[in-house]
Image (tube, grey):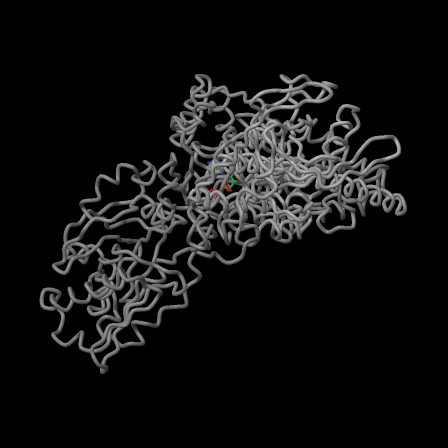
């Protein structure tokens, strides 16, 4: 559709000059003719045909105007625009039906000045109105914009010929450019007419840029819509196709229905589990993935395991609390001897908790969750004390009193945070942490949950597990505990957590902060006796299938076990030893029954296996947890079914020694202090107090030196140095020879493998040294504790109560204590205050006065002290150090 210049002999300007003042006017339907532009016209109406034929025979110039309303068949002069284009007819083609196809080319704009004829066709007097071309910069800028937008538009019209665009870009004349674009880009009729009517070229261009830019936008958006629709159609088609294929494959493998049934089952379980909205969303998302997966995919089982976890958790399940303080007291009393203070405090704790719950102070509301501080709901109960004092069994009693389920886990020996919080699901073989595992096992969201060895956190853990633990325990955080594996919040706020540990010293401070600590110090011999009689013996009898009338455990025998075979703050070892005796007796009873049976013929239905499970090692020592008790019960029935009653076996102290072997602890202090250079000290350890010996030896003829052994910490090493310096600087006062400390001095604190630290062995070290150097032994029934200064003052120490109890256990009768510790003595049980004599001292001289025997009492002391004499202490029996 290129312009047709100079087709005939004349050029276009000549043609314009020849345009007459009066023109025949041809109305155009749906088209606007522009100057320069060549176009074909179809002419069919008789008056128009006549017009063309007349003009074709004449000067071939015609005026073209557009009709305002294209629906009108034959317009009147008012129904056509007054501005049009004069054009020259290049060629007329006639078809058989009388219609014409006319090729015309626009020449110049005109305005109708007056209509001169209406018949046989319109004629008008016209005035040519050439465009106003300024040649300005604005025109140039508009020309470029026009080219740009035209190029963009051409790209969006797929059928737009490339060469046409190239031609357009090379055009010099801006008028030609405007008209060419206007006639080729299919713009609206009204826009085209407006364009023609504008007098200034700049206005025409501006208008055209606007129209074309709009067209570009419309087309771009249209294209985007089309592309998106196409994509969507492709995707759904693709999915449909794949699903069809998958169904076919499943059917072929014969597994289609199973998979679907499984998915349905999960859907139902999810709906019934009562899980939170968040968990439900996650579960459903995973289920949707599962649905699309073949069971052979490794991922299939990963998702299944995850869903199994989610549906199995006790999201809503809980036991009903029936907390009645009087009942709780009864339960605690039933299960535990004495411990009055402890029970009192536990009851207070429970009462406060109950009250808070009743008054709604423990419920976390939406508003709380939205950032307002949650009122510090009750603290975490924490029982601290040596092993075997009943911490675990108190926890169990609390659960029983509340009617809650009980579960426990140990924090000691755990390796990293993931054990608490689990591994993320992206890890192969990931599992939830042990907290959630335990919760799932109990099947309720409100068990009593005991966390043992909370004092071992951090010491043998990697990562930062105490922060994870804090999240579990802190009432302000644990209503939304997030396990890494489950990755959804779980409400732990209904769980009653109870921590246990041996000492508060190593509990991470942020945890300790939130704890209500109850300390249990340990038992005196008297307490142990009662615990044994009322609880341990009956339990062990039952566990070993013995009847109460088959065995008599007298008080003297229990005392013998306590004194000679245990050295502990709690009663664990005691229970083990009682258990050992019970097993031995059970074996005897069983043997006696065998003999009886041999003698008398068997009665029909009599048990063949009476006592078969007695003496079973596997249910013995450490198996004293409550769960095992129930397992041993059926044995009772069997034993009862046995025939004749046998004579009860009475356990005497002699029998105890017969069953348990040589005494393990007796006279230890006495044995150890038989020679000069050994003094009995008292130490505090997390497992309760302990008796510890300080040994000193001199190695004459060697260079002056101090050797320290026995795994001593820095503070204890310094104490030893101070003790030696004190002695060296007081040789004269102590009545010692000037050169007595010249050689090497060796201080040792058995047992060598157990780490020890602290300043409180100070006076014991001085005493051991002076005993060595003077050759005077230390009284065997005497223990001591106290820090010493270089000047010989005795300073107070900590942990006195446990230390004194340990001294009492070890059979010591007198204990040297710093004077400033006398207030602590009040805390001691009456029993101990009555049985132990306390010597309060301020100065180390007083210690020596009370500790050392007179010289005459030790015949060896007459002779010079030799290294052999001072070090050759008999190999001591193992010290009763037991780690919980
Ligand atoms: P811990 O948890 O403190 O190490 P346990 O709770 O395991 O100690 O106690 C060890 C055993 O001693 C248990 O069988 C417990 O019932 C018993 N026991 C401890 N103290 C008492 C007590 N005061 N009365 C009755 N039994 C006790």
The residue nearer to you, when weighing 733 against 154, is 154
Using the image, determine if residue 51 lies above or below residue 8: above
Q: Residue at x 42, y 34 (%)?
A: 380
- Residue situated furthest bottom in the rendering: 701
**Residue 538 can be seen in this image:** no
Using the image, determine if residue 307 lies above or below residue 113: below
- Dividing the picture into quarters, in which one does residue 671 lie? bottom left
Q: Position of residue 338 (x, y in %)?
A: 43, 32
The residue nearer to you, when weighing 322 against 581, is 322
Horizontal side of residue 514 vs 413, given as left or right = left
Q: Position of residue 386 (x, y in %)?
A: 42, 45
- Dividing the picture into quarters, in which one does residue 190 lie? top right
Q: Position of residue 521 (x, y in %)?
A: 38, 41
Horizontal side of residue 72 vs 209, given as left or right = right
Q: Residue at x 64, y 52 (%)?
A: 429
Using the image, determine if residue 111 lies above or below residue 450: above
The residue nearer to you, when weighing 530 against 480, is 480
Q: Position of residue 846 (x, y in %)?
A: 16, 54
The residue nearer to you, when weighing 335 against 168, is 168
**Residue 764 can be seen in this image:** yes
Image quarter (top left, top right, bottom left or bottom right) of the N terminus: top right
């Amino acid at each position: 559709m290129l312009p047709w210049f100079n087709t005939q002999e004349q050029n276009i300007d000549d043609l314009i000059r020849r345009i007459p003042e009066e023109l025949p006017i041809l109305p155009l339907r749906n088209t606007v003719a522009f100057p320069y532009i060549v176009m074909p016209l179809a002419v069919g109406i008789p008056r128009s045909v006549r017009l063309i034929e007349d003009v074709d025979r004449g000067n071939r110039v015609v005026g073209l105007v557009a009709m305002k309303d294209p629906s009108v068949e034959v317009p009147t002069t008012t129904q056509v625009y007054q501005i049009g284009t004069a054009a020259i007819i290049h060629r007329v083609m006639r078809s058989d039906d009388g219609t014409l196809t006319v090729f015309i080319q626009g020449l110049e704009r005109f305005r109708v000045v007056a209509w001169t004829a209406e018949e046989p066709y319109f004629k008008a007097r016209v005035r040519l109105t050439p465009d106003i071309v300024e040649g300005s910069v604005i025109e140039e800028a508009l020309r470029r914009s026009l080219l740009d937008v035209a190029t963009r538009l051409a790209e969006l019209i797929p059928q737009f010929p490339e060469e046409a665009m190239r031609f357009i870009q090379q055009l010099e004349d801006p008028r030609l450019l405007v008209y060419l674009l206007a006639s080729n880009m299919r713009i609206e009729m009204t826009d085209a007419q407006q364009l023609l009517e504008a007098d200034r070229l700049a206005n025409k261009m501006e208008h055209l840029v606007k129209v074309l830019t709009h067209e570009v936008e419309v087309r771009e958006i249209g294209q985007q819509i089309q592309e998106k629709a196409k994509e969507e159609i492709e995707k759904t088609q693709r999915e449909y196709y794949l699903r069809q294929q998958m169904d076919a494959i499943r059917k072929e493998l014969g597994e289609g229905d199973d998979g679907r049934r499984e998915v349905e089952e999960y859907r139902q379980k999810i709906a019934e589990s009562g899980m939170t909205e968040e968990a439900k969303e996650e579960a459903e998302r995973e289920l949707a993935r599962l649905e699309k997966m073949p069971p052979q995919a490794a991922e299939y089982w990963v998702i299944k395991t995850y869903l199994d976890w989610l549906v199995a958790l006790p999201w809503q399940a809980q036991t009903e609390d029936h907390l009645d303080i009087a009942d709780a007291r009864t339960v605690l009393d039933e299960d535990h001897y004495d411990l009055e203070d402890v029970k009192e405090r536990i009851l207070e704790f429970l009462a406060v908790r109950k009250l808070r719950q009743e008054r709604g102070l423990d419920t976390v509301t939406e508003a709380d969750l939205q950032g307002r501080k949650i009122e510090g709901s009750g603290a975490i109960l924490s029982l601290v004390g040596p092993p075997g004092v009943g911490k675990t069994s108190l926890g169990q009693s609390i659960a029983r009193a509340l009617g809650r389920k009980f579960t426990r886990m140990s924090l000691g020996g755990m390796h990293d945070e993931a054990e608490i919080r689990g591994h993320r699901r992206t890890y192969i073989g990931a599992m939830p942490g042990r907290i959630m595992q335990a919760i799932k096992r109990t099947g309720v969201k409100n068990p009593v949950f005991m966390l043992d060895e909370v004092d071992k956190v951090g010491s043998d853990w990697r990562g930062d597990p105490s922060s994870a633990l804090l999240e579990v325990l802190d009432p302000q955080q644990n209503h939304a505990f997030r396990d890494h594996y489950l990755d959804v919040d779980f409400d732990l706020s209904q769980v009653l957590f109870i921590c246990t540990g041996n000492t508060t010293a190593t509990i991470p401070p942020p945890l300790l902060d939130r704890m209500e600590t109850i300390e249990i110090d340990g038992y005196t011999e008297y307490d142990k006796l009662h615990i044994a009689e009322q609880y341990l013996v009956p339990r062990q009898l039952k566990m070993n299938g013995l009847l109460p009338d088959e065995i008599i455990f007298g008080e003297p025998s229990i005392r013998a076990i306590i004194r000679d075979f245990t050295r502990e703050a709690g009663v664990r070892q005691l229970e083990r030893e009682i258990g050992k005796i019970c097993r031995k007796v059970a074996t005897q009873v069983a043997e006696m029954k065998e003999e009886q049976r041999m003698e008398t013929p068997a009665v029909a239905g009599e048990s063949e296996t009476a006592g078969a499970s007695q003496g079973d090692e596997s249910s013995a020592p450490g198996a004293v947890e409550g769960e095992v008790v129930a397992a041993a019960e059926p044995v009772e029935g069997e034993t009862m079914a046995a025939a004749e009653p046998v004579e009860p076996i009475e356990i005497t102290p002699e029998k105890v020694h017969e069953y348990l072997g040589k005494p393990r602890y007796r006279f230890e202090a006495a044995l150890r202090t038989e020679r000069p250079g050994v003094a009995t000290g008292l130490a505090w350890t997390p497992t309760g107090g302990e008796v510890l010996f300080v040994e000193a030896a001199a190695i004459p003829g060697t260079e002056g030196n101090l050797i320290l052994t026995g795994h001593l910490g820095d503070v204890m090493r310094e104490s030893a140095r101070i003790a030696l310096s004190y002695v060296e600087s007081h040789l004269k006062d102590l009545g010692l020879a000037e050169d007595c400390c010249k050689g090497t001095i060796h201080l040792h604190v058995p047992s060598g493998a157990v780490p020890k630290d602290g300043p409180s062995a100070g006076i014991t070290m001085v005493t051991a040294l002076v005993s060595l150097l003077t050759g005077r032994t230390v009284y065997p029934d005497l223990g001591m504790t106290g820090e010493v200064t270089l000047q010989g003052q005795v300073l107070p120490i900590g942990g006195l109560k446990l230390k004194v109890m340990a001294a009492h256990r070890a059979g010591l009768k007198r204990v040297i204590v710093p004077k400033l510790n006398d207030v602590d003595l009040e805390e001691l049980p009456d029993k101990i205050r009555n049985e132990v004599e306390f010597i309060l001292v301020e100065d180390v001289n007083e210690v020596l006065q009370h500790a050392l025997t007179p010289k005459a009492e030790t015949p060896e002391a007459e002779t010079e002290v030799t290294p052999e004499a001072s070090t050759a202490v008999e190999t001591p029996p193992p010290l009763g150090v037991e780690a919980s």
